[in-house]
Amino acid sequence: MALDIRRHAKTDAGARKVIERQCWPGGRTTCPRCGAVKAYALAEGRMRCAACRYTFHALTGRFAGLAGLTPRQWLRLLELFAAEETANAMAATLGVAYNTAYKAASLVRLAILAASFDGLAILRGPLGRELGFSGKTLRPVSADAPLAQVPVFGILERGDMAFVDYLPDMTPEDILHFNLHFSLPLSRLGAIVFSDRYQRYQTLVTCGAEVLTRRFVEVAGRMPAVAPRQEGFWAYARDRLVRFHGVTARKFPLYLKELEFRFNSRDNDILPILLANVCTFVPELA
Ligand SMILES: [Zn+2]
């Protein structure tokens, strides 16, 4: 039976129970190293594997295990994340440093990305390393540090669902080329440049490409801007991207994937999904 996450988040013991139920369904304390199910309970929720003697706890090897938060802090943070609060607000409510809250929020976004349709392919490629994620650790990279290669995403809409496809073979220079030679209309939102419909994609979008922002004035004079749409994914995403102050090239891929998830889950309570995502094992990236 599902536990009421919000109610159990009020106490340390309740929160730990929620996390352990999520990580060890049916009480099966699977060893993250060898996969054996038999383990001995030690103090404070730690277990020792009967087969390989490895000591672990519920979050060992999982996204949530990389953050240094208690189970109760995790559940509170996920509630705030679900409510679209900022890392500043999370830090203040949890009484932790801003960097701790920001790192935990980044792990939530990475876990969302990992669970998305092309998430593992993204994390295993060069873009995954650019996001500061190397599998067992999250190496904080300054949000303002430029990317070696600025990615392009294509937004595909099917019925009520939106898919944000990472297009590894496309570059911001290609978008410029489509504008200059094939009259593809472009518009700009801060450092974000987005296009009108291109082939099967509703929109091509990229953020922080020097070549595009530098030439945008010239580009914008050539074509009508992209006609603003009042509904669908991009209208939803655009409003929120404006509210994320100062989206940088490095933050953009995770924000965009987060918005894909929020849009596709917009009629659901996302808290249990977020909990399941951060409690999954960090994928092998090698
Ligand atoms: Zn083991």
Image (cartoon, grey):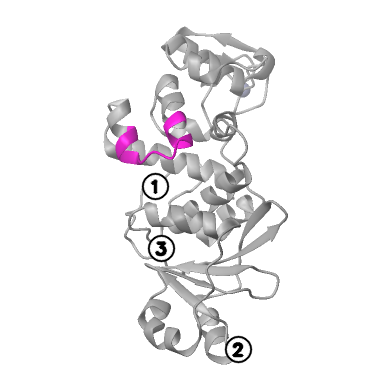
Q: Toward which corner of the image does residue 181 lie, by quadrant?
A: bottom right
Q: Quadrant of ligand 1?
A: top right
Q: Toward which corner of the image does residue 218 lie, by quadrant?
A: bottom left
Closer to the N terminus: mark 2 or mark 3? 2
Q: Toward which corner of the image does residue 39 lie, by quadrant?
A: top right
Is 141 situated above or below 284? below
- Tag 3: Cα neighbours inside 10 Å, few (<14), some, or many (≥20)? many
Is the distance from the Cβ of mark 2 to the nearest ligand 1 atom less than 8 Å? no
Tag 2: amino acid: Phe
- Residue 17: tell me if it is visible: yes
- Tag 2: Cα neighbours inside 10 Å, few (<14), some, or many (≥20)? few
| Residue at far front of view | 230
- Magenta extent: 79-90
Q: In the image, which disc is placed on residue 182?
A: 2
Tag 1: amino acid: Arg
Is the distance from the Cβ of mark 3 to the nearest ligand 1 atom less than 8 Å? no
Tag 3: amino acid: Ala
Residue mark closest to the camera, 3 vs 1:
3
Residue 159 image position (x, y, % from top left): 73, 54
- Along the line of sight, the residue nearer the viewer: 123 or 248: 248
The secondary structure type at the circle numbered 3 is: loop
Assess whether mark 1 and mark 2 are in contact (beta carbons under 8 angstroms): no
Locate the N terminus by quadrant.
Answer: top right
List the residue tagged with mark 3: 249
Is 153 situated above or below 31? below
List the residue tagged with mark 1: 139
- Along the line of sight, the residue nearer the viewer: 12 or 159: 159
The secondary structure type at the circle numbered 1 is: loop
Residue 96 image position (x, y, % from top left): 28, 29
The secondary structure type at the circle numbered 2 is: helix
